[in-house]
Image: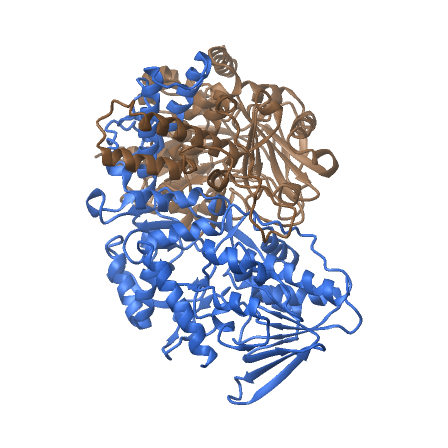
Chain colours: A blue, B brown
Amino acid sequence: MSSASRGSGLTRRQWLHAMGRRSGGAGVYAAMSFLGLAEASTATPAFSLGEAPKGATVLVIGAGVAGLVSALELQRAGYQVQLLEYNDRPGGRSWTLRGGDRYTELGGATQHCQFDQGQYLNPGPWRLPYHHHGVLSYCKQLGVALEPFVQVNHNAYVHSTRSFGGQPQRWRKVQADFQGDVAELLAKVLQQRKLDEPLTEDDRERLLAALRNTGGLDNEMRYRGGFAASKRRGTEPAQDDGLHMVKDHEQPRSLQEMLDPEFWARMNESRDFEYQTPLFQPVGGMDAIPRALAKAVGPKIRYRARVTEISQDDHGVVARYEDLNRPGRMLTARAQWCVCTLPLSILSQLEIRVGDELRNAIQSVPYFAATKVGLQFKRRFWEEDEAIYGGISLTDLPIMQIGYPNYGFQGRKGVLLGAYTFGTNAYEFAAMSPAQRIRETVRLGTRIHKQYPAEFENGMAVAWHRSPFTLGCFGWWTEETRARHYPAMLKMDGRIILAGEHASLLTAWQEGAVLSARHAITQLHKKAVGA
Amino acid sequence: MSSASRGSGLTRRQWLHAMGRRSGGAGVYAAMSFLGLAEASTATPAFSLGEAPKGATVLVIGAGVAGLVSALELQRAGYQVQLLEYNDRPGGRSWTLRGGDRYTELGGATQHCQFDQGQYLNPGPWRLPYHHHGVLSYCKQLGVALEPFVQVNHNAYVHSTRSFGGQPQRWRKVQADFQGDVAELLAKVLQQRKLDEPLTEDDRERLLAALRNTGGLDNEMRYRGGFAASKRRGTEPAQDDGLHMVKDHEQPRSLQEMLDPEFWARMNESRDFEYQTPLFQPVGGMDAIPRALAKAVGPKIRYRARVTEISQDDHGVVARYEDLNRPGRMLTARAQWCVCTLPLSILSQLEIRVGDELRNAIQSVPYFAATKVGLQFKRRFWEEDEAIYGGISLTDLPIMQIGYPNYGFQGRKGVLLGAYTFGTNAYEFAAMSPAQRIRETVRLGTRIHKQYPAEFENGMAVAWHRSPFTLGCFGWWTEETRARHYPAMLKMDGRIILAGEHASLLTAWQEGAVLSARHAITQLHKKAVGA
């Protein structure tokens, strides 16, 4: 049985099994969000490995963030490092598509990116939480300029086909109306003294004051159309000269309308630690990070090297790889030690000489499905017509969200993230051709922005399960697989150790790759110096 | 009786009267926040005045945002415009201080700005709400690049000398703990069915689910130390390799601790429509806006012209002004019409020939007091040591807030907004010398950032009541003065019309200046064309 079919079969089966227990994209999303969180990164800018044994050599496989960080820190410690990379660029999933780029996915479909100069799409990671200290420290060391990433735009939309008659709603109104109603309900109970909490009279008064202020309640502690509520939910541009007080305040929505649970689960994501302001993005595209890392690593990166086999014995590690510049030509790389950062989806299909524990771990983690579609439009109608500058609109349509560019504000053109889909939605997108994905994204997005058909120019669609270098988006641990296989994933197996977001708790995040890389080379170094 | 002493006397008395009814900075702040809000700007990018009568001339006094917008749009319509400006630069309060700048305040104290290249302080406006369509439209027309302004930084501090033992608290924790407690209290009432709201059983369940998710409640609908709460309040960087689950979740604070009303009033400001994300700042400093406007207006701006008298008759308007390049030399400017954008604090001290209604209005608006102090530090310790990248910390100390620079992230040095004080606090700061203000800002700020004394390099302090070109920060309308005098402020008086933030509802905002300018020139144009 070839390792290829075995690996991919497992992945698929486990994935579908996991999917069966959940209900579509939002369920998966909530579960995903559940898995990797409440972990502040611990990396400090002061990471340092120590001194390498004289002449010690390391082979690093994969020049994504984990491989690049491993190589850089190993070199700094004095190791002789060689790095093999499948693509013709560093970064792996930390990737930016620009005009002139070409991308061929599994199955052979090739896209030619036609974005205008200065426009880009980050098909992989696109934001950096402020507490991802490891990634931020490399940005600082290597001079990667950062700018804020707008996560919550109060004027963006939340859209549910099942609520508000299917009409997109401004985020600020939905949020204010929910909070206003909650504040009013609790205030009423407090005023009626129905609460059996041990609140002093003074605390009760102070809580009422805080509720009034927070919720936007009026003098009678009611949340209703008026000055106080409008202060929280905002107003629409008036039609006069703007120099006179608003008289007709819109009435808030009823609480009943506000209770779509999918709605709330999605909006509340921005309250998660991982998405709390401020977030950042590298100026000009996410690949500024891997490119800066690769520059620091220097010439020891061999691109277009497809590793097919990794073996080891008591003396060292040998990797066989195909030189994709001369297809069919097999070469060999040797070193005393190896840090392997290949995604498990790829690694599970290779011959690799490791023990059963690690082998089982490698075979046990399916990969999460995601698709991103970038759309270039002739003008930034979301800014010009709708006053949405950056941030994200949420929808229960299969496109799931629309991300507005957080750069080039008020410029002439713009590239939207027209779809960022997960789970079953992503599988459906992956089953389409790139051109179909783009068409479908335009078709669905038109329900939120009617300007789409008139303003659309071109697009790029990356379905991660069709990416030849990852065959998926990121390691999709469950509580069960985490308990059974995660410890093995972190352990050195002879002379080989794994690294990558999949070997961390911060799956899907570049910070996971950094932490994992630092952990891996620390283990390797201990063994190399015989500590 | 000279108009000068009359004007300043009135301003002072009314101000102190207003102050007497309020309780310090936060009270003033809340009241201020109350006055100018719930007004989305109505200006659209498509503003156009029409065609000027042949040979029509307008004198615009003041080259702040209102004067510049007036001049630009009048020129576009074909008016011949002359602009007089007291300072040697455009912008007025829309101003940026950089290394090499010199500033002499009332009383003669002169500061020489020693900021490093690339560092700056906006002593006046520093942020642009996304719904200030007028200002944004000029940024777009004139190519002023914008970047996000971080308003809420979840990792910044809220600090009250009366709460939490006087220790600064991370914003994210205070916010999450309040919301978690409120969600838990309401959930309990719902579960006990004590609510006499007409909620269906289904809605009740859905509300409970939303409360649980929003508040970070656990399976038992309790807000307490654990995974769910940590997802909302965040965690501290752990001390291990970051690859293992957090086990010891911090316990939330008790609700009682969270009820400091001043605390809440201040934090909730960021929920106001005016401060909802996204906000923006011009790249490189706020004066990018007036400089772009002034460039578009062209050579018709005469700088260092101190207007002392404005008269009018049936044929035109005459302004007398001193050429400050040749002190004592009085010159005269004439035109058919006049847009006067001088702050009322200045205007109330000049001879101006207008009717009683407008004269009374001019004399009736005291000016709000504010002080900003910028501090340059040797390193960005707030980022390096405390992971605070941009945003604002709040404190009840007289400095009131600390603003972290929203540019140059992870750079070597940085200029903090060390104090942004209002009301009585601002008066106390204005009474000090600039050097004393800076010392006091460093002394007080050390209670929040202990690194201040070791890292401080230099500072700049602008107390707006000592600014010779405004004698205050912005027009401080009360409900009473607004009702009595605002209509007169908007009306053309013969051939003169006023413009500026003071002649708008969006006082203190550049958008108020834009709206007012557009309104003023529209009135003027109607009269000029005899409509």
Residue B178 falls left or right of residue A222: right
Q: Residue B436 at what x, y percent from top left? A: 69, 25
Q: Residue A488 at what x, y percent from top left? A: 58, 62
Asked if residue A420 is positioned above or below residue B13 in the image, the reply reads below
Residue B120 falls left or right of residue A476: right
State the residue in front, A269 or B227: B227
Residue at the (51%, 25%) spot, across then down? B254
Asked if residue B199 is positioned above or below residue A504 in the image, the reply reads above
Asked if residue A138 is positioned above or below residue B186 in the image, the reply reads below
Report the residue that reaches farthest toward the right: A54
Report the residue that reaches farthest toward the front: A356
Q: Quadrant of residue B507?
A: top left
Badge count: 0
Q: Residue B527 at what x, y percent from top left? A: 26, 32
Residue at the (63%, 33%) spot, across then down? B103
- Residue B352 appears in the rendering: no
State the residue in front, B312 or A255: A255
Q: Residue B448 at what x, y percent from top left? A: 64, 31
Residue A22 falls left or right of residue A352: left
Residue at the (29%, 33%) spot, across then down? B523
Asked if residue A340 is positioned above or below residue A189 in the image, the reply reads below
In which quadrant of the rendered image does the C terminus of chain B lie? Answer: top left
- Residue B454 appears in the rendering: yes
Residue at the (67%, 63%) spot, across then down? A521
State the residue in front, A400 or A389: A400
State the residue in front, B312 or A396: A396
